[in-house]
Each structure stands twice: as structure tokens, then as C-alpha cells.
Image: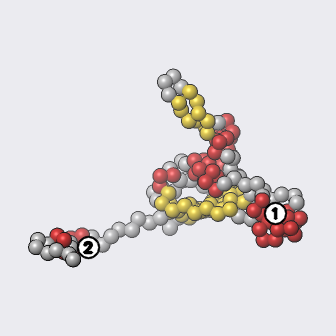
Amino acid sequence: MTTITLTLPYPISVNRYWMPVKMKNHLAILPTKEGREYRALTAASCRSQGVTAKITGRVHVDIKLYPKRPLDWQKRVKKDGAAWDDSVMCLDIDNANKVLLDSMKDLVIEDDKWIRRLTSERMEPDEHGARVVVTITALAVEQPQVSMFDEKPVPYPEDIVGVTLV
């Protein structure tokens, strides 16, 4: 099973990644300049970590989002204990997922339509800075036993003429 783990730049907001553009008779949604820059940064980061080909087919994507640790983090720990990072500014997980998955399309994965399992977690900020750790694992397609489909199905009582259920 193929697995790739990448440390990528902290994503921008989806609101800054995409923008509506009026065309002749319709509205198109296109990446902004900032969105194209983030995608280029993601591509460079993937190449520098050894990605030479995308994983094709079904995948599981695991995302760990690390927000930037604030300068006053020790003060927050003393005040709030284990929940100190609840007040740290961070993108919401859905927002980060959309930007990450769109930026990895055709670089690491074929398309987000191939994602069969997606797990995301907001992590506690640490000394390594704002980032995202993404693990992509190819999923095997499980084949059913062909012999199971060769036999005639056992009829349910409703399918048998003259039988009524009470």
C-alpha cells in the first residue's frame, strides 16, 4: 500500500483562494492570485519532499492542522490549562480541507472525487510553526467473492406466493 506523508504550508482561507469572475454570459469561479501562489508553494513543497507522481485511485487523506503558536502561549497555559489553545486563531477544518485538497489535485492525488476516507484534526500549536501534515494512503479495492453472486438469492417470505407475514 502506497503512503505519502507531507508537511505543507498552512492553508489560506477558501474565501481568499477562489473568486467569482463574470464572463460573457455566466459566472466562473477561478483561483485568485493568492490561491495560485498557495498552489505553487504547495507544489514546490511536494517536489522538495520527493513527490514525483500522484497516487491514483481511491485514497485515504489524513490532515493534521497546526495553527501558529501565539507569543503569549505560556500565559494562556497558566490561565486556561489544557484548553489554552481553544482561543488560538485557526482556520476551521472544513475551510482548510477544501483549500488543501484543491491545491493537491493533480500533484499528489488525481482529484478529490477519489477520496474515500477523510480524517482531519486541529492540533495544539507547537514550536515548529503553522503548517499542515497530510498523510495520503492508497486504498485497495476489495473484490467480493465471485462465487457469492453465482448462486440464486434466497427468497424472502414476502417473495413467496401465498405467504403472509403477521
What colour-coding does the image apply?
secondary structure
Q: Position of residue 56 (x, y in %)?
A: 48, 55
Q: Please, what is the three-letter code of the amino acid marked with disc 2?
A: Met
Q: Residues within 10 Å of mark 1 (few under 14, many from 20)?
A: few
Q: Quadrant of residue 162?
A: bottom left
In the drawing, does residue 163 fall left or right of residue 40? left
Describe the element under mark 1 as helix, strand or loop: loop
Q: In the image, which disc is placed on residue 127?
A: 1
Describe the element under mark 2 as helix, strand or loop: helix
The residue positioned 47% from the left and 52% from the top of the image is 113
Nearer to us in this view, 46 or 123: 123
The residue positioned 78% from the left and 58% from the top of the image is 88
- Name the residue beneath numbered marker 2: 148
* Residue 33 seen in this snapshot: yes
Query: Nearer the N terminus, badge 2 or badge 1?
Result: 1
Q: Position of residue 106 (x, y in %)?
A: 54, 48
Tell which residue pokes out farthest to the bottom in this image. 166
Marks 2 and 1 sit apart, C-alpha to C-alpha, by 55 Å
